[in-house]
Amino acid sequence: MDYKILATTFVMVFLAELGDKTQLATFCLSADNDSKVSVFIGSAGALVLSSLIAVLCGTAISRVIPVNYIKIAAGIFFIAVGVWTIYAVLKAT
């Protein structure tokens, strides 16, 4: 096991998840329900499953498409989402 990659992945995912919709949904569910353990297990399980899907898809796609192209496509996607978000906010005001 590569502990450097483990630590890097943990820190990146942890920071990316702080304050996102998933965390806010978990926060609201926890505030609204008495079974905090059920909310935690459901939320943690969903994150683990979505991470598994991402790893499997990333592994499969990287066998067909070079990693640099995947990174470029991801960057373009994030920029497009950012531009679309700014446009939606400006249009709404």
Image (cartoon, rainbow, N blue to C red):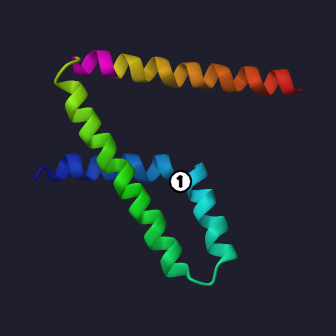
Question: Which of the two residues, 37 or 67, is positioned nearer the viewer here?
Answer: 37
Q: Is residue 19 visible?
A: no
Q: State the image coordinates of residue 16 (x, y, percent, origin top left).
A: 47, 46
Q: State the image coordinates of residue 11 (x, y, percent, origin top left).
A: 36, 51
As shown in the figure, which amino acid type bears the numbered disc 1?
Leu
Identity of the residue drawn at 33% across and 41% down: 54
Q: State the image coordinates of residue 81 (x, y, percent, origin top left).
A: 59, 25
User: Is 4 within the magenta?
Assistant: no
Direction from residue 25 to residue 72 in the image, left or right: left
Point out the image quarter for the C terminus: top right
Question: Which of the two residues, 58 or 90, is positioned nearer the viewer here?
Answer: 58
* Other-residue count near label 1 (Cα within 10 Å), few / some / many at <14 / 14–19 / ≥20: few
Identity of the residue drawn at 49% across and 80% down: 37
Which residue corresponds to mark 1? 18
Boundaries of the magenta span? 66-70
Q: Give the vertical position of 28 relative to 89 (above or below).
A: below
Direction from residue 87 to residue 59 in the image, left or right: left
- Helix, strand or loop at label 1? It is loop
Q: State the image coordinates of residue 92 (x, y, percent, origin top left).
A: 86, 27
Q: Is residue 46 visible?
A: yes
Q: Residue most toward the right?
A: 93
Identity of the residue drawn at 43% across and 53% down: 14
Q: Residue most toward the bottom?
A: 34
Identity of the residue drawn at 19% across and 19% down: 64
Q: Give the vertical position of 63 relative to 17 (above or below).
A: above
Question: Which of the two residues, 57 or 93, is positioned nearer the viewer here?
Answer: 57
Q: Give the vertical position of 3 relative to 60 (above or below).
A: below
SS majority, magenta: helix
Q: What count of labels does the image hold?
A: 1
Q: Quadrant of residue 83?
A: top right
